[in-house]
Amino acid sequence: MITARVAAIVAAALVSILLASGCGGDAVDEAPLPVPTASPPSATFPPGIFLALAEPEGGASLWSSGGELPANLRFFGQGFDVRDEFIVIAEERELVVLTARGKERRIPIDGLHAIARPSLSPDGRFVAVQATERPPGEEQPQFLTIYMIDLETGDWRRAAPIMASPSAPTSRRSGWPTDASHTGPPKASAS
């Protein structure tokens, strides 16, 4: 004789088999479960110290103490600065913006020459650079002047007097300007 407990187990097993095979009762069509996919690679640069390492063929590659970079970056230029999403590189008469995914955008800077040592604003919209308005072939200044460049438009303006020594009181800045005269976008570049 079958006990009540054995009967309950057999009944539960039969119901499970019937539902799994799509037979009987009010079987509901269920959508298949989504297959987990790998998350996309990080689109940001790791925190850490960044160095430009000279390449034997010329140019430099970027190295980070924070670990592997999201893209293999090689560049030529006179300095760089890094944000989470992109790096900006100074190249003689233009700025190069490289994203963490390896996409490149070149921003020609009309009217400035010998662009070097970029430093990004905290919001990443502007970059301060050292440069000169004198084209190659003319007598070059002893000190490069500091300029602010809008990364969207390429427009620039002076942030320090021309030929001011980097240590002169008139050109010394402690951080990014915060007064109203320095917060808006740069004026259109002189051509």
Image (cartoon, rainbow, N blue to C red):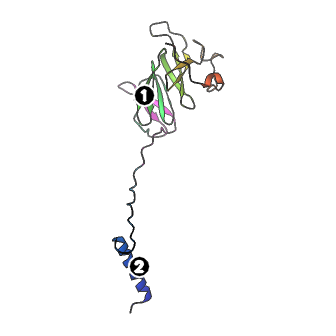
Residue tagged by mark 1?
Answer: 105
Which percent across, then down, holds residue 44? 47, 39
Q: Position of residue 21 (x, y in %)?
A: 33, 71
Q: Main secondary structure of the magenta part?
A: loop
Which percent across, then down, holds residue 156? Answer: 53, 19
The residue at 40%/55% (across/down) is: 36
Q: Is residue 91 visible?
A: no
Q: Residue at x 64, y 21 (%)?
A: 181
Where residue 172 sits, quadrant-wise, is: top right
* Residue found at the far front of this picture: 26
**181 or 128: which is nearer to us?**
181
Identify the mark at residue 157; answer none if there is no mark. none
Find the distance from the CA under tag 1 to the CA under tag 2: 65 Å
What residue range appears in magenta? 39-67
Q: Earlier in the sequence, mark 1 or mark 2?
A: 2
Residue 95 x/y as whole percent: 46, 23
User: Dot 2 lies on which element?
Assistant: helix
Foreground residue among 168 and 190: 190
In the displayed structure, 28 sits above or below 120; it is: below
Please name the amino acid that badge 1 sits on.
Arg
Occupied quadrant, residue 14 = bottom left
Q: Is residue 46 magenta?
A: yes
Location of the N terminus by quadrant is bottom left
- What kind of residue is marked 2? Ala
> Where residue 12 is drawn, which disc sits there?
2
Q: Magenta segment: does it hold 146?
A: no
